[in-house]
Amino acid sequence: MTISRVRQGEGINFYSRKWVRPEDLNANGTLFGGSLLRWIDEEAAIYAIIQLGNQRVVTKFISEIDFEASARQGDLIEMGLVAVGFGRTSVTMRAEVRNMITRKTILTIERIVFVNLGPDGRAAPHGYSSITYDRDRAPASAEQGKD
């Protein structure tokens, strides 16, 4: 697998935004890390689906998570992902979360790996080696594939 180096914020598109609400806070009154990780995993899954053209993808690996700052109630945060490598059955991406107003980095994850699955639920080759910025690989509706 080829992994390209992406520096902080470089090559990442910040399209997903969240508003930190009371139910997202921990006992310290800051954003609960578990909530943030759930949001990232969901965004990464959507990103993997688009990159691999398949709705059947699973999280395989998440590297060290570097919490650099926190967020408080009312903050607007944005999440960014970029594919940094393609394996035969996987895509590896980098994630960054930042405060939308101050642009201060909240969290970085250097590697999140998703695996492409076939109809049998096993890892399957996807045939891609480059990032797409279009919806050309978006999978057809799950309903379209049913007989």
Image (spheres, grey):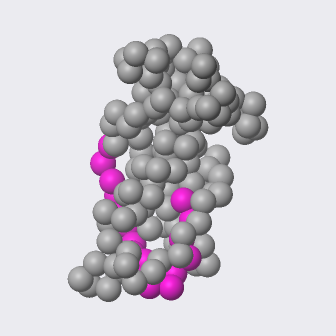
Count of labels in the image: 0
Residue 73 placed where, x, y %?
44, 85
Q: Residue furthest front?
A: 147
Which residue is located at x 41 percent, y 40 percent?
Answer: 112
**Picture quadrant where residue 39 is located:** bottom left
Left or right side of 124 for 82: right
Q: Is residue 70 magenta?
A: yes
Which residue is located at x 37 percent, y 78 percent?
Answer: 23
Relative to residue 134, is residue 86 depicted above or below? above
Residue 123 placed where, x, y %?
40, 18
Instruction: Judge whether residue 55 can be spotted in this image.
Output: yes
**Picture quadrant where residue 58 is located:** top left
Residue 146 placed where, x, y %?
59, 23
Image quadrant in which the C terminus is located: top right
Relative to residue 29, is residue 129 depicted above or below? above
Left or right side of 133 for 63: left
Relative to residue 40, is residue 136 depicted above or below? above
Q: Is residue 73 magenta?
A: yes
Q: Write down the region rendered in magenta.
A: 63-79
